Amino acid sequence: MIINDSKSKNVTGITPEETNQIYNFLQGSVYCWCKNRPHEWFATRDLLGGANFDWNGTPLYVLYNKHINNGKPNEEAIEQAGKEVGWLLKTVLMNDLRQFESQPGHVKTYRWIR
């Protein structure tokens, strides 16, 4: 499925500036992936260093911190922030000049097609 024809969820609780910083960060990660691994499938976690949760010093940290400040335990905050990064990545890909396709599954994966 070409993702330019799909929808993404909105992320709330962060400022428009923080959202734009996350978009820029993710866009840079996508460009690096596509340059170094053209046409290979990727998931959000592939762009962000795998299962290692260390977003300190990145624009993504505000998502985790938002959930911690709302009283969620660490593991739940990590899970919720990870879902939100996935939604934001989908928005980035939908707005990209290139086209990407997606595969459904437990973990959503994408691939640059043109």
Image (cartoon, rainbow, N blue to C red):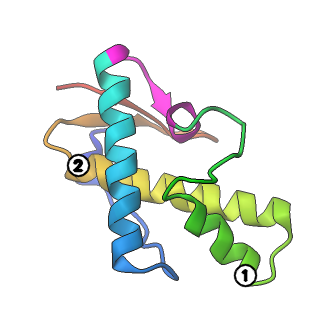
For the residue carrying disc 1, how many other residues have a C-alpha within 10 Å: few (<14), some (14-19), or many (20+)? few
Query: Is residue 77 positioned above or below 66 on the image?
Result: above
Q: Residue at x 86, y 70 (%)?
A: 73
Side of 30 where 45 appears, left or right: right
User: Image point 27% across, 40% down: which residue?
Assistant: 2
Q: Secondary structure at mark 1?
A: helix
Region of the chain picked out in magenta, as a range: 36-47
Which x, y percent locates residue 78? 73, 58
Residue 48 versus residue 75 in the image, above or below: above
Position of the C terminus, as image quadrant, is: top left
> Residue 45: which quarter of the image?
top right
Depth check: give the residue in front, 87 or 104: 87
Q: Is residue 114 magenta?
A: no
Which residue carries the number 2 mark? 4
Residue 55 vs residue 87: left or right? right
User: Which mark identifies residue 69?
Assistant: 1
**In the depicted structure, whether residue 42 falls above or below residue 96:** above
Residue 53 appears at what percent x and percent y? 71, 45
Camera-side mark, 2 or 1: 1
- In the figure, residue 48 lies in which quadrant? top right
Relative image position of residue 37 (x, y in whole percent): 37, 15
Considering the image in quadrants, where does the N terminus appear?
top left
Mark 2 is surrounded, within 10 Å at the Cα level, by few (under 14), some (14 to 19) or many (20 or more) other residues, namely some
Secondary element at tag 2: helix
Identified by mark 1, the residue type is Asn
Of the two numbered discs 2 and 1 on the same chain, state the one appearing first in sequence.
Answer: 2
In reply to whether residue 42 is colored magenta, the answer given is: yes
Find the residue positioned furthest to the front.
57
Residue name at image x 67 percent, y 64 percent: 80
Q: Nearer the viewer, residue 7 or 65?
A: 65
